[in-house]
Amino acid sequence: MNNNNDNYNEIREKFFDFLLRKPSTQKQANEYLSRLKVPENYREVLMNEAENLGLIDDFAFARLFVDGHLTWGNAKISYELGARGVPREYIRAALDEADDEAERAAEIAEDLRRSGIDEKKIRSRLISRGFFR
């Protein structure tokens, strides 16, 4: 019994260290526990504890991600958050809170114009960043 408890505490410490180093979604946290080959009964307890402590919060993750990627368009942000397992309703809500996409694109385009980049390249760069989709 003591060996199981030691094993659980070691897994818990690794998991919480992972969450404290890098904000993660539920999907990413579950994938981390899978890579560690954590038994299902431990995984569920750890995930619940982390959520209760606020270490895993997909909506907060989405909001922080959007705030940190305002030079990307909504299409690219949506794709990246979806790939990380964030529910669509959280993605939409986080994007609704962000600055207007058209305004962000206009600011980026203006900065690029001031740098002497021609309009065709500006449009191409904006499209590659997920604007205009």
Image: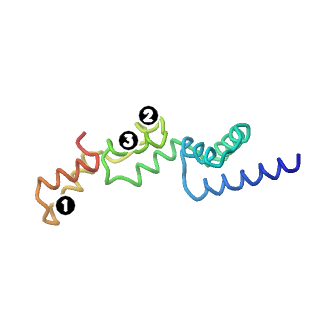
Residue 76 falls left or right of residue 105: right
Q: Position of residue 112 (x, y in %)?
A: 19, 61
Residue in the foreground of this view, choosing between 99 and 90: 90
Residue 122 at what x, y percent from top left? 17, 55
Mark 2 or 3: in front is: 3
Query: Residue shown at 23%/51% (left/top)?
Result: 126
Judge from the rendering whether residue 121 lies leftward or rightward of residue 95; answer left or right. left
CA neighbours of label 3 inside 10 A, class few (<14), some (14 to 19), many (20+): some
Q: Under tag 3, what secondary structure? A: helix
Residue beneath disc 2: 88
Mark 1 is on which residue type? Answer: Leu
Q: Which residue is mark 3?
A: 79
Disc with the residue nearer the chain's start (1 vs 3): 3
Q: Position of residue 35 (x, y in %)?
A: 61, 47
Tell me: 27 left or right of 121.
right
Q: Of the residues shown, which amino acid type is indicated by label 3? A: Tyr
**Pointer 1: what residue?**
112
- Most extreme residue toward the right is 1
Instruction: Give SS at disc 1.
Output: helix
Which residue is at 53% across, 42% downward?
58
